[in-house]
Image: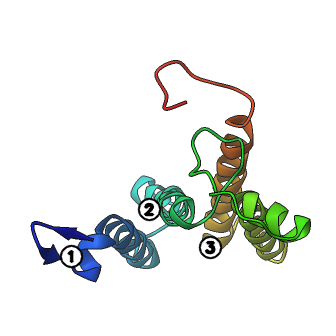
Amino acid sequence: MRRHGRRRSFFHQHSLSLAALAVVIFLILLYSRSNPDTHLGSFFGNAIADWTGVVVTVVMTKHLYEKGSAESKQPKPVIAPAVVEFLREHSLTIFLVITGAGWVLAFRAMDPTSRWGQVVGNIVSEWTQILGLVLMTKRFIEIGSKE
């Protein structure tokens, strides 16, 4: 938190999260005002899902864990009841499954060809991709990665 005796501001400490969130908000504004039937409008819709995934990846991997995943921060050992420890050690996967189910329910209630239905469908895809990556990094490795 401190470097050279100075306390870092909230904005400095969370600048990556805030910048990615600002990009999502900006893309939502652009998409809201664009024609989704054009290349540019379609791009904005796809980019909303991609950048929402970036926000989740940046923020949630900072606070949640996935035991055994080389790409996830590893939880510090804590003596707690087994259920509590399991929930903590797999909090990232649990978060992605619960919020992903919410996105799936939202998508089911929408017309998939509607303006926002396409965006929510892309977000469902993004969530599936993130969850898959988290789970795959528990078993598979890639040379040059941090494992």
Question: Element type at marker 1?
Answer: loop
Task: Tell which tag, 2 or 1, sits nearer the viewer.
Answer: 1
- Depicted 117 relative to depicted 9: above or below: above
Q: Considering depth in this image, is 65 or 60 the residue closer to the camera?
A: 65
Q: Which quadrant: the C terminus?
A: top right
Residue 112: in sight, yes or no?
no
The residue at 68%/57% (across/down) is 77
- The span from disc 2 to disc 1 (Cα, nearest Å) is 34 Å
Please name the residue that numbered disc 2 is placed on. 44
Q: Which image quadrant for residue 65?
A: bottom right
Please name the residue that numbered disc 1 is placed on. 8
Q: Considering depth in this image, is 49 or 62 the residue closer to the camera?
A: 62
- The span from disc 3 to disc 2 (Cα, nearest Å) is 11 Å
Residue type beneath disc 2: Phe
Residue type beneath disc 3: Trp
Percent position (x, y) of residue 62?
A: 50, 62
Label 2 neighbour load within 10 Å: few <14, some 14-19, many 20+: many
Percent position (x, y) of residue 9?
A: 22, 80
